[in-house]
Image: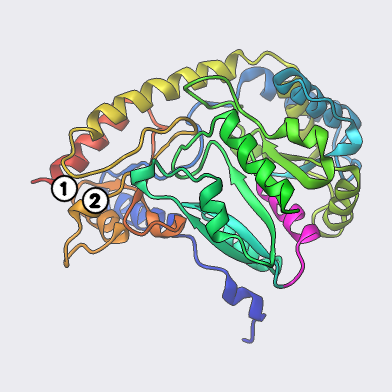
Amino acid sequence: MNFAERMKKIKPSATLAFNAKALELKAAGIDVTSLAVGEPDAPTPLHICEAAKKAIDDNFTKYTAVPGIMELRQAVCHYFQRQYNVSAKPENVILTTGGKQSLANTLFVMLNDGDDVLLPCPYWTSYPDLIRLAGGNPVLVPASSAKGFRIDVSDLEKAVTPKTRMIILNSPSNPTGVAYTQEEVDAMVKWCFERDIFVLADEIYDQLVYDGAPVSAACWWEKNPEKIAIVNGLSKAFSMPGWRVGYTLAHADLIKQSSKLQGQMTSHMCSIAQKAALAALDGSYDCVEEMRRDFLRRRDLAMAEISTWPGVVCPKPGGAFYLFPDMSALLTPEMPDGTAVCTYLLEKARVVCVPGEAFGAPNCIRLSYSVSDETLMDALRRMKEALYH
């Protein structure tokens, strides 16, 4: 068969490849622990599930407006007012089938063929492919483990090109857990605005921060809505990954263009999930705080263990629920990169990790601490034993 040339721009998922190997071992009766999953382990809070059940009982199963029901768009506005003291209107919001669709919408309606997009590296695995599918070119802005995987304005200065149209800022970060301060975000956004570079801020982990209050670029959106879009969703903070609830806060004109695109691609997000999302955003956030405390405890447990691994450099994550250790000191001709490390750990320790190559950092591996304390510590100890036997 002859497939479209654009499909050559997309790389297979490294996460899925290692999950497939893990499933093969499990099918053979071998106990395997996965630290590869990028989703909270807690159940979706009960009041959210009850709202979805009521929506079904009420037969709320018909089409809605493409950008979402008005009450939910208003609830997103309330979220930004409640969390960041930022005022927005429903016309500035579109609900999407997960945060990934919000990202894709924005990239597709903002980029022309050949536009460059600054991409801090390590990056979330889908960013480069989404940029390429939208006709853009990802321009990497490298951040080393020695710098805590952080970038600053000086790094942007080195990477900017005459064709730079956009930057993607993800904080807290997947895969590194880097959480920028408000001052750091402000400096980078201001630099972009001065150069007419559009800012796409992915804040999906904004409520899962451990060292200070949540940080957002939303204050800059309120001042310059034509220069920035904020992407978020309910998958992480409200433990709703399978519900597929994302949203974009942007200029009304960008929202109209996104609605036009989405109307031809998927139409609105699931009507039942919209009612569940409404209950989440308008309800108590105690469940969010409980999960945040659980992740904080696990981060500290994991960091204490990994700090005993000779040669391994693992900057302390300030948010999300990932560790991104740099394994460079342990690499050998027989185990030359993070992919080989992950293969070795799967075979010897029976632990699934994700190779750093998927995130633009081939000497690293990604671990998720979104598992129970006992499961996490058992897996890490098995990994250490395999690496230093």
Residue 63 is left or right of residue 208, and the answer is right
Residue 158 is left or right of residue 352, and the answer is right
**Mark 2 Cα-neighbour bin, 10 Å: few <14, some 14–19, many ≥20:** many
Please provide percent x and percent y for residue 47.
Answer: 68, 17
**Residue at screen point 35% across, 46% down:** 145
Specify the amino acid type for callout 1: Leu
Would you say residue 138 is visible in this rendering? yes
**Mark 1 Cα-neighbour bin, 10 Å: few <14, some 14–19, many ≥20:** some
Q: Which mark is residue 345?
A: 2
Cβ atoms under marks 2 and 1 closer than 8 Å: yes
Magenta-tinted stretch: 100-113
Q: Quadrant of residue 261?
A: bottom right
Q: Is residue 103 magenta?
A: yes
Judged from the image, the secondary structure of the residue bearing numbered disc 2 is helix
Residue lying farthest left? 389
Compute the Cα span from label 2 to label 1: 8 Å
Residue lying farthest bottom? 2
Specify the amino acid type for callout 2: Leu
Q: Nearer the viewer, residue 281 or 230?
A: 230
Q: Which mark is residue 387?
A: 1
Prevailing secondary structure of the magenta residues: helix
Please provide percent x and percent y for residue 12.
Answer: 50, 66
Q: Is residue 99 magenta?
A: no
Q: Nearer the viewer, mark 2 or mark 1?
A: 1
Q: Quadrant of residue 337?
A: bottom left
Position above or below: 5 against 280: below
Quarter in which the N terminus is drawn: bottom right
**Residue at screen point 78% across, 36% down:** 221
Q: Nearer the viewer, residue 328 or 305?
A: 328
Look at the image and name its color scheme: rainbow
